[in-house]
Image (tube, rainbow, N blue to C red):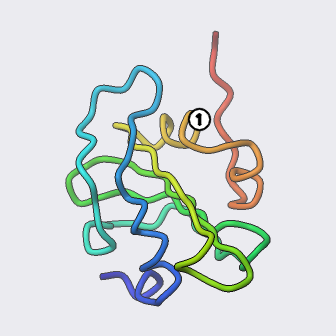
Amino acid sequence: MLKELNNYDWAEVFKYADPTPVIGCKVSTSGFTQDDVKRIIAMVDGTNDEESWVGVFELHDGRFVSISAGCDYTGWGCQEGGSSQVASSEDEIVRFGLTDEERERLGIKEKNYDQ
């Protein structure tokens, strides 16, 4: 496991690693764990009752995932929630697997795509 993911908060976030595919992507939707992460593309810690923990990762099996989860002021285990997305490329996960706010918090931008 990558050292950046080896802590209590990220362990709780990864409970929501049951992804749905991004629009038009045909890729495995099997769950993943912190141990499956090959590379951290971008991640940002959250704050209880405020911003969610958000990350974009490349997995050892070649998939790209985004995950976001948060909790209330009492911490994990009471009022919490999260979701994850999966795609076959980094561009797809950045474009379709993140909100504008998440991209801004992570400091990444989607590329300009021709329509």
In the image, residue 73 above or below residue 44 = below
Label 1 Cα crowd, 10 Å radius (few <14 / some 14-19 / many 20+): some
Give the total number of marks visible in the rendering. Answer: 1
Q: Is 59 placed left or right of 21 in the picture?
A: left
Residue found 75% across the figure and 67% down from its top: 51
In the image, residue 43 above or below residue 17 = below
Q: Secondary structure at mark 1?
A: helix
Instruction: Locate the N terminus and report the quarter of the image it occupies.
Output: bottom left
Instruction: Locate the C terminus and report the quarter of the image it occupies.
Output: top right
In the image, residue 47 above or below residue 21 = below
Report the residue that reaches farthest toward the front.
78
Residue found 58% across the figure and 76% down from its top: 78
Residue found 46% across the figure and 67% down from its top: 40
Q: Is 34 placed left or right of 22 in the picture?
A: left
Displayed quadrant of residue 106: bottom right
In the image, residue 54 above or below residue 29 = below
**Mark 1 highlights which residue?**
95
In the rendering, at what x and y percent does residue 49 appear? Answer: 76, 74
Residue found 68% across the figure and 27% down from its top: 112
In the rendering, at what x and y percent does residue 64 appear? Answer: 38, 48
Q: Residue flagged by tag 1: what amino acid is it?
A: Arg
Displayed quadrant of residue 27: top left
In the rendering, at what x and y percent does residue 81 appear? Answer: 56, 61
Q: Is 80 placed left or right of 1 in the picture?
A: right
